[in-house]
Image: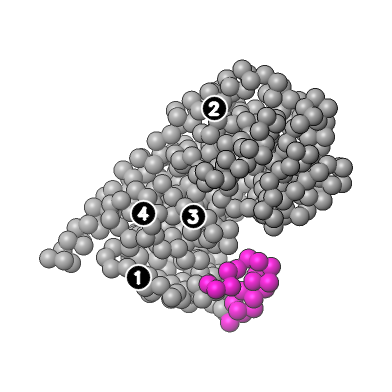
Amino acid sequence: MAPEGWPLTLSLYRLFTAAASPFAPALISHRLKHGKEHPGRLDERYGESKLKRPAGPLIWVHCASVGELLAVVPLIERIREKDFAVLCTSGTVTSAKLAEQRLPAGTIHQFVVLDTPRFAQRFLDRWRPDLALFVESDLWPNLILTTARRGTPLILVNGRLSEGSFKRWRRVPGTISALLRCFDLCLAQSVAHAERYRDLGAPRVVVTGSLKLDVPQPPAEPAKLDALKTAVASRSVIAGASTHAGEETLLVEAHRRLRGSFPRLLTIVVPRHPDRGPGVIEIAHAADLKATLRSRGELPAADTDIYIADTLGELGLIYRVAPVVFVGKSLASHGGGQNPIEAIKLGAAILHGPHVSNFAEIYDALDKAHGAEQVTDVGKLAVRIGAWLKDAGERAAVVAAGKEVVQTLGGALDRTLTALEPYLVQLRLERRDANA
């Protein structure tokens, strides 16, 4: 339930966001011009929708963006198998596109509303969720407070709180404590995350593990996979996945250093934000390397050095042709890391930078077991890529160790479902009584 008295910070936040509501169309228009909104779905940002609420209990799952959505897809699938309707919200255009591809049939996707009291109330009045699951750390105060005031149970799923976020929240302890006390239950990814939530005031915390360890192998369309395999046949292939600004330059430089030893080397770069593809091709051309964009419908030619996969939802394709993968947002100065699990499950040997705080426990376990390796600069990146391309046996040992770590740390999906089961049972009983 919502706390009896909100701290001044939350009261001021609500007043400020309420006063800012009339300016929402200007904000949405600005975002639309920069490609951050879907032009046909702007009403969803105001809590409106062309879709109808399904009959019966409705479970609302909120994700911030692509990573959170991917992590929670298996959980949504299991909930749908139990015959519950699911509404999934997320905040980005890329996550909405991925939702179309990955969410199970019958799941409703909506863009999350702008976090004002009026829009939050309108959203909740329209959908009337019976249970709300917030994924990881995307905590919108008005949505949380308004949901809690309505008596709707709130559960934090796959909870993660970085050391940096923890320190920032400690500066406003009353604010975060009030928000966390709105949650009936906090399901944390690790003991470290659980301790941070407890220190900040979460009343009930359970360690369930990371759902990202239980994600299935990402799909790949057979025809597209066959075409790519044919195009890269007999070439040495490496990939940089979910790369951020600065990392593409390092990958291009590593390629330039390696091509003397591997004259038919192909480097596939998958920028985290596909609209950065043209910028990556400029980096390659500046290094006097031949590059092409997948978004143009092109496959790598025999003389292509850098192949830029500036598309969405095709990492499963890339991981199946690249035996060595550098996982991005880990050498970038604003790092935090990206999820290595999907690549490991598809048999790739993993390299990463030192900035992996978003997945610290996973990378720590992988590195200790020699199931992945950290590199700190372009020199070490090139050396390790070259060593693994030359020594298939060493590469296979890294892959096997990585898979063993993932298998050992898995099981979060079942533990999360066990924690949710009392709430699902209650919804089943209420549905039975309503139908009696």
Q: Earlier in the sequence, mark 1 or mark 2?
A: 1
Residue 359: x and y in percent read 57, 39
Residue for badge 1 = 53
Looking at the rendered structure, the kind of residue marked 4 is Asp
Residue found at the far left of this picture: 436
Residue 391: x and y in percent read 67, 19
Q: Earlier in the sequence, mark 4 or mark 1?
A: 1
Q: Nearer the viewer, mark 3 or mark 1?
A: 3
Q: Secondary structure at mark 2?
A: helix
Q: Is residue 115 visible?
A: yes
Q: CA distance from mark 3 to mark 2?
A: 27 Å
Vertical order, 222 against 259 (above or below): below
Looking at the image, residue 155 sits to the left or right of residue 361; the answer is: left
Vertical order, 173 against 388 (above or below): below
Residue 274 in which image quadrant: bottom right
Looking at the rendered structure, the kind of residue marked 1 is Arg
Vertical order, 29 against 147 (above or below): below
Vertical order, 272 against 325 (above or below): below
Residue for badge 2 = 402
Tell me where the magenta segment starts and ends, as one range: 22-41
Q: CA distance from mark 4 to mark 2?
A: 35 Å
